């Protein structure tokens, strides 16, 4: 069971983060200077799949922490619709583990022609975009061979947080990242139990808010990609506007509570719909009861997202294996997806 490639990659996350704290030389301060000088007034992200979940995360933290309007733009707006924009005050961030997708390559090229400052976040320093983008931030995740992205997603979150910290003028960031890796290494023997979840039921919701909602999108994607389960992500506020009608006893309900102001409202939001199913699974840093998924909150709570995902990824791989699925060969999928 432990010879799975994607399991090995997910378990390597603490060591990848430790190495990152020592070798990261990305140009965060140069982007921070552009923002502080008002040369960048809004941010647009372009991504697909897991990378788009990271883009959703970035939209939240850029708006919340830096006051910059941010959104994730579907690549087809540029590649198929041929829409034109004034990007002269925009930072366009292309997020791609492989950096090879043709639609993302085209989006970076066209965005630059429309006046944008472009930044590629990738794990591939040989990506064609590296030579054209104004900036390249290396994930430093090491080669990720698996179809399902794990460590590259965590590294993307780390880069995005480090960029925000740089813009805020926070010091000793690398020391904090080093401490994060030590926290993860100390906790690596406390793996989540795959027997907690009923694997005979293949539908449900996962609820979150704030950065937690971005994480629910990636968690949902992994349930679909690796486990063939339709666990749909919703804001715990939005689910009340209709989707709660789907909930019944044969329906899983995951509740993800982060430690920011938005995340702390999730449990309250979820109280009503929790009445409609007994299959409730809480993911939080506050409740260690046996039927819950506990993650230890980091000293810097902004890193809690990374702590959570470092625990989730090995669990979802083992959960897929328990269902008799091969997480190294998710059905119909390939590493680089062509959509253009």
Image: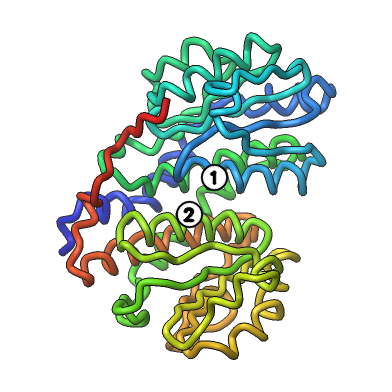
| Circles 1, 2 touching at the beta carbon (< 8 Å) | yes
Q: Position of residue 339 (x, y in %)?
A: 40, 30
Q: Nearer the viewer, residue 201 or 317?
A: 201
Could you tell whether 50 is left or right of 57 in the image? left
- Number of labelled discs? 2
At 64% from the left edge and 64% from the top edge, which residue is drawn? 235
In the rendering, which numbered label is found on residue 54?
1
Report helix, strand or loop for mark 2: helix
Residue 225: x and y in percent read 34, 54
Q: Is residue 153 left or right of residue 299?
A: left
Q: Is residue 5 left or right of residue 191?
A: left
Q: Which of the 4 quarters of the picture holds residue 29?
A: top right
Q: CA distance from mark 1 to mark 2?
A: 8 Å
Q: Residue furthest right?
A: 38
| Residue in the foreground of this view, choosing between 190 and 220 | 220
| Crowding at mark 1 (Cα within 10 Å: few <14, some 14-19, many 20+) | many
- Under circle 1, the secondary element is helix
x and y percentages locating residue 25 in the rendered image:
52, 27
The answer to whether residue 322 is above or below residue 287 is: above
| Residue at x 47% of width, y 38% of height | 48
Q: Quadrant of the C terminus?
A: top left
What residue is at 80 percent from the left and 20 percent from the top? 39
290 to 194, vertically: above or below: below
Residue named by callout 2 = 218
* Rendered image quadrant of residue 38: top right
User: Reading the chain from its start, which is encountered first: label 1 or label 2?
Assistant: 1
């Amino acid at each position: 069971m432990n010879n799975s490639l994607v399991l090995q990659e997910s378990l390597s996350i603490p060591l990848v983060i430790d190495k990152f704290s020592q070798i990261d030389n990305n140009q965060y301060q140069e982007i921070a200077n552009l923002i502080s000088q008002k040369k960048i007034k809004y941010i647009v992200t372009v991504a697909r799949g897991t990378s788009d979940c990271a883009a959703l995360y970035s939209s939240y933290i850029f708006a919340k922490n830096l006051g910059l309007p941010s959104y994730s733009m579907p690549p087809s707006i540029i590649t198929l619709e041929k829409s034109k924009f004034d990007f002269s005050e925009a930072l366009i961030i292309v997020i791609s583990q492989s950096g090879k997708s043709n639609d993302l390559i085209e989006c970076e090229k066209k965005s630059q022609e429309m006046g944008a400052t472009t930044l590629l976040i990738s794990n591939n320093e040989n990506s064609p975009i590296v030579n054209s983008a104004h900036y390249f931030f290396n994930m430093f995740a090491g080669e990720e061979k698996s179809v399902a992205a794990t460590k590259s997603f965590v590294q993307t979150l780390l880069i995005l947080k480090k960029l925000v910290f740089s813009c805020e003028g926070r010091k000793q960031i690398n020391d904090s990242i080093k401490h994060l890796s030590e926290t993860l290494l100390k906790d690596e023997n406390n793996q989540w139990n795959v027997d907690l979840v009923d694997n005979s039921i293949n539908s449900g919701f996962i609820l979150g808010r704030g950065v937690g909602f971005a994480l629910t999108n990636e968690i949902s994607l992994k349930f679909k990609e690796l486990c063939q389960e339709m666990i749909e992500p919703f804001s715990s506020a939005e689910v009340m506007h209709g989707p709660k009608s789907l909930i019944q006893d044969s329906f899983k309900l995951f509740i993800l509570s982060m430690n920011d102001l938005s995340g702390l409202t999730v449990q309250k939001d979820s109280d009503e719909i929790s009445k409609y199913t007994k299959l409730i699974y809480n993911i939080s840093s506050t409740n260690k009861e046996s039927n819950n998924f506990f993650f230890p909150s980091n000293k810097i709570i902004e890193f809690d997202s990374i702590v959570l995902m470092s625990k989730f990824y090995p669990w979802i791989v083992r959960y897929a294996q328990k269902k008799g699925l091969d997480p190294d060969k998710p059905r119909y999928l390939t590493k680089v997806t062509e959509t253009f």
